[in-house]
Amino acid sequence: MAFSERVSRLKSSLIREILAAAQRPEVMSFAGGLPAEAMLPKVEWADMPLAMGQYGMSEGEPALREALAAEARALGVPCEASQVLVVSGSQQTLDLAAKLYIDKGTEIMLEAPTYLAALQIFQLFGADCLTVPLEADGPNLNELRARLEKHHPAFIYLIPTFQNPSAVRYSEAKRDAVAALLDEFGVTLIEDEPYRELTFDGGSATPIVSRLKKASWIYTGTVSKTLLPGLRVGYLIASPDLFPHLLRLKQSADLHTNRVGQWQALQWIGSEKFRDHLSELRDFYRVRRDAFQLALETHFCDLAEWNVPQGGLFFWLTLKQPLDTRTLLNEALAQDVAFMPGEPFFSEPDNNPGHLRLNFSHIDPARLDEGLKRLAGVVRQAQAAQAA
């Protein structure tokens, strides 16, 4: 059977495979980035107009685009509703950007580590992935400049606010410096911010796109982490030179994002009830973050190092005695524990052993301690075998 050449680069999603294996009710899962079901808001559908069942505009519902533009402007993003494209989850933004920019061998730039699904999409289209190491407050600026001086990437993809998987939040100084470098070298920025609203310390920082003076940009977000992931509603906002191309790619992909989900999102975005919901969400996840931190100190303090996340949904652990954490999966699942190995978050996984991404939002607090205790036991057993 003759498939496209691209299919040879298609990789299965390790996180999806792990989540499938973790469906057994006895499994204690730290694997996925799932919101807590207890915090999924109750929604009403009775007032939805019948017309929402009809075909719609490729750009998205006009009122929703206006609401999203107003929210973005409040963050400092310079935009009008005409620059907003409602997408089928922010994941679609990455697919559209890949179609817009990537041919086989196209150089792009990413953080190391980076969002696993973004890496999969970009590699599927044949990208040559250049990486910049992350520090506690953002990318290593010397490394970033050195790569930009040597290469000419089609774009750079960044997650500057509670990055997935590392939970890093860029400092103000790093945001300014990154923007200045992208302007200097004329590199398009794709800025992905699905976790911006999930801040636990009240801190905030304006997006990098708001600091650009010359470079083209795409800013993308979603309601999946703050409202309902099942709606599959996200958005992108693009500089005027990019928007028409992204719109045509959207039209060719799926005509438009589902109007039913858009209508529901519009009932919340910018409303008082949404602000109240976000406040409750932050409080809820802060408590879960703190409980997770205490359990990690009990079971992992001799095994790993980590920074306490100030937002988002993940802890990122670095083992003091590195090993390929993918080799721990089978034994962990045998112990009824699921987690996400760190290696797949790097473009060269075999060269980056010794990290674990652990989700704290979804695990039942009553099972948290036992789950981390078992996972720590799996790590200790593997390290002892490695040392033998």
Image: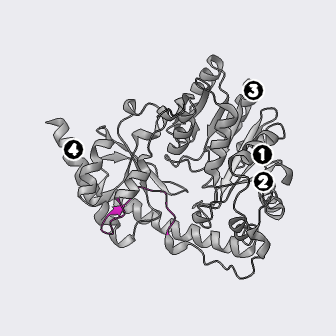
**Please, what is the three-letter code of the amino acid marked with disc 4?**
Ala
Q: How many discs appear? A: 4
Q: Is 239 placed above or below 74 here? A: above
Residue interval drawn in magenta? 22-36
Per the model, the C-alpha gap separating discs 1 and 4 is 50 Å
Residue 21 on image: x %, y %: 34, 57
Give the mark nearest the N terminus, 4 or 2.
2
Residue designated by label 3: 186
Which badge, 3 or 4, comes first in the chain's sequence? Answer: 3
User: Can you name the residue that lies furthest to the bottom here?
Assistant: 46
The type of residue carrying mark 1 is Leu
For label 1, the crowd category at 10 Å Cα-Cα, with few meaning under 14, some 14 to 19 and many 20 or more, is: many
- Nearest to the eye among marks 4 and 2: give it: 2
Residue 329 place in picture, x, y as percent: 30, 49
Residue indicated by mark 4: 382
**Left or right of 70, for residue 37:** left
Q: What residue is shown with label 2?
A: 58
What residue is pinned by disc 1?
A: 247
Mark 3 → mark 4, Cα distance in angstroms:
47 Å
Crowding at dot 3, Cα within 10 Å, few <14 / some 14-19 / many 20+, comes out as some
